[in-house]
Each structure stands twice: as C-alpha cells, then as structure tokens.
Image: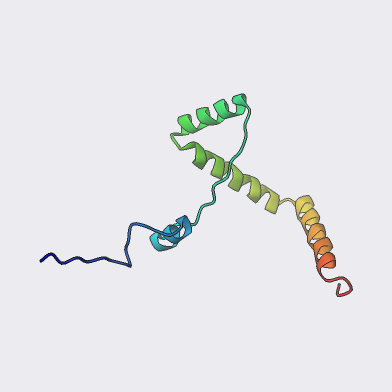
C-alpha cells in the first residue's frame, strides 16, 4: 500500500497570481501593455542592457520616479485636489 499526502498549505499551484504573491510574501503585480516607438524600445533595451537589469524593472523604476516627482509637485497636487473636490460634488451634491 502507498500512502499519499497532499500539503494544502504549501501547494505550488495557486488560484491566482495574487494568491501566490500573498503566500510567497511578494507584492501583487498587475500586467500592463504599453506601445513604444521603435526608437523608444531600442533605447529602453539599451538602458536595461547597460544596467544589467530586466526591461520591466527599468520601466518600474522610471514609473516610480515619475510618481514621486508628481507627489512633490505643488501644481499637480492642486490639480489633483480640484479633481477630487469635483468628484465629491458629483457623488454627494449639496453635502459639500
């Protein structure tokens, strides 16, 4: 007789990538598609090769830097606050 054991806590198969990320201690990732000109794609690949990094990591770093710059930009923050206020007025007219 052969005994079988199935470990339900450490299964290598996950229902979703988010489940894997949670269990493996990683941040959940979302896949996105971007379109680049041939020149942009070539420049991006060159930067990634020189930095010895995956293209996706170079893109994530650039996005993180862009977001950080916007967070520190007073003009952007004022525009963001204006959009939030307009959205709140649409959701609950008369309460603001």
Q: Nearer the viewer, residue 80 or 19?
A: 19
Q: Which of 21 and 84 is in front in this view?
A: 21
Q: Where is residue 25 in the image (x, y as percent from the top left)?
A: 41, 60
Residue occupying the point 78% across, 61% down: 84
Residue occupying the point 51% across, 52% down: 29
Left or right: where 4 falls relative to 77: left
Q: In which quarter of the image is residue 12?
A: bottom left
Q: In which quarter of the image is the C terminus?
A: bottom right
Q: Position of residue 47 (x, y in %)?
A: 52, 31
Q: In which quarter of the image is residue 5?
A: bottom left
Q: Position of residue 66 (x, y in %)?
A: 64, 45
Left or right: where 45 falls relative to 78: left
Q: Nearer the viewer, residue 17 or 26?
A: 17
Count of marks, rendered view: 0
Left or right: where 90 falls relative to 72: right
Depicted 81 relative to depicted 69: above or below: below
Which residue in the rendered view is the most extreme toward the left? 1
Which residue in the rendered view is the most extreme toward the front? 1
Left or right: where 55 falls relative to 5: right
Which residue in the rendered view is the most extreme toward the bottom? 95
Residue occupying the point 36% across, 57% down: 13
Residue occupying the point 81% across, 66% down: 88
Q: In which quarter of the image is the N terminus?
A: bottom left
How is the model colour-coded? rainbow
Q: Which of 86 and 78 is in front in this view?
A: 86
């Amino acid at each position: 007789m052969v005994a079988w054991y199935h470990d339900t806590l450490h299964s290598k198969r996950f229902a979703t990538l988010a489940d894997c990320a949670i269990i493996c201690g990683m941040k959940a990732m979302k896949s996105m598609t971007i379109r680049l000109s041939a020149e942009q794609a070539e420049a991006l690949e060159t930067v990634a090769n020189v930095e010895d990094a995956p293209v996706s990591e170079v893109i994530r770093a650039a996005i993180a830097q862009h977001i950080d710059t916007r967070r520190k930009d007073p003009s952007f923050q004022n525009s963001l606050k204006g959009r939030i206020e307009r959205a709140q007025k649409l959701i609950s007219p008369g309460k603001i």
